[in-house]
Image: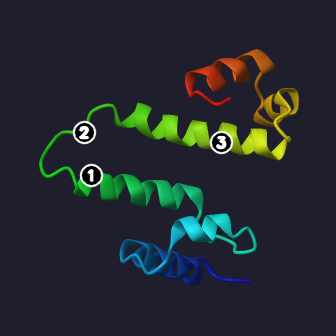
């Protein structure tokens, strides 16, 4: 079993490799046999910090809505794909009603 320190070193190495474009994240995501070992909270935090570093002194506007929208849309799409686009099953997996799922699908233009 890996220690937290060892896991952190692996995560940091992968984040650095992603920044240097040594790892093609899109290809790793498409290849379902490859496990992505970066925990979502770490990846989100790093991505937001990278966003802040690229603002060049400008104040961020609407960051929460932007991040939550991207995450929520991806979550909805993944649940729908996993359920074979059965909205009732996807809604149940997400812990929401089917009508709420439909509203969110309309909001994010998921058809």
Residue positioned 50% across, 60% down in the render: 43
Q: Which colour scheme is used?
A: rainbow
Judge from the rendering whether residue 51 lies leftward or rightward of residue 78; answer left or right. left
Q: In which quarter of the image is the C terminus?
A: top right
Q: Residues within 10 Å of mark 2 (few under 14, many from 20)?
A: few
Labels 1 & 3 near each other (Cβ < 8 A):
no
Residue positioned 74% across, 83% down in the render: 1
Count of picture labels: 3
Q: Residue 75 carries which label?
A: 3
The image shows residue 53 at horizontal and vertical percentages of: 24, 57
Mark 1 and mark 3: Cα distance apart in space: 24 Å
Residue positioned 87% across, 33% down in the render: 89
Q: Earlier in the sequence, mark 1 or mark 2?
A: 1
Q: Which of marks 1 and 3 is nearer the N terminus?
A: 1
Q: Name the residue under label 1.
A: 52
Q: In this rendering, which labeled residue sits more in front, label 1 or label 3?
A: 3
- Position of residue 22 relative to residue 69, above or below, is below
Q: Residue 60 carries which label?
A: 2
Q: Quick one: SS at disc 2?
A: loop
Q: Quick one: SS at disc 3?
A: helix
Judge from the rendering whether residue 101 lies leftward or rightward of residue 12; answer left or right. right
Q: How crowded is mark 3: few (under 14 residues within 10 Å), some or many (20 or more)?
A: few
Q: Residue 68 carries which label?
A: none
The image shows residue 93 at horizontal and vertical percentages of: 82, 37
Q: How crowded is mark 1: few (under 14 residues within 10 Å), some or many (20 or more)?
A: some
Labels 1 & 2 near each other (Cβ < 8 A):
yes
Judge from the rendering whether residue 21 lies leftward or rightward of residue 82; answer left or right. left
Mark 1 and mark 2: Cα distance apart in space: 8 Å
The image shows residue 19 at horizontal and vertical percentages of: 37, 72
Q: In this rendering, which labeled residue sits more in front, label 3 or label 2?
A: 3
């Amino acid at each position: 079993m890996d220690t937290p320190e060892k896991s952190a070193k692996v995560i940091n190495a992968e984040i650095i490799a992603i920044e240097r474009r040594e790892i093609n994240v899109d290809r790793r995501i498409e290849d379902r046999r490859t496990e992505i070992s970066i925990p979502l909270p770490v990846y989100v935090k790093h991505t937001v910090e990278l966003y802040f570093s690229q603002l060049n002194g400008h104040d961020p506007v609407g960051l929460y809505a932007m991040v939550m929208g991207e995450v929520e849309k991806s979550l909805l799409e993944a649940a729908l794909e996993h359920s074979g686009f059965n909205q009732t099953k996807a809604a149940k997996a997400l812990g929401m009603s089917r009508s709420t799922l439909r509203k969110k699908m309309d909001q994010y233009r998921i058809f």
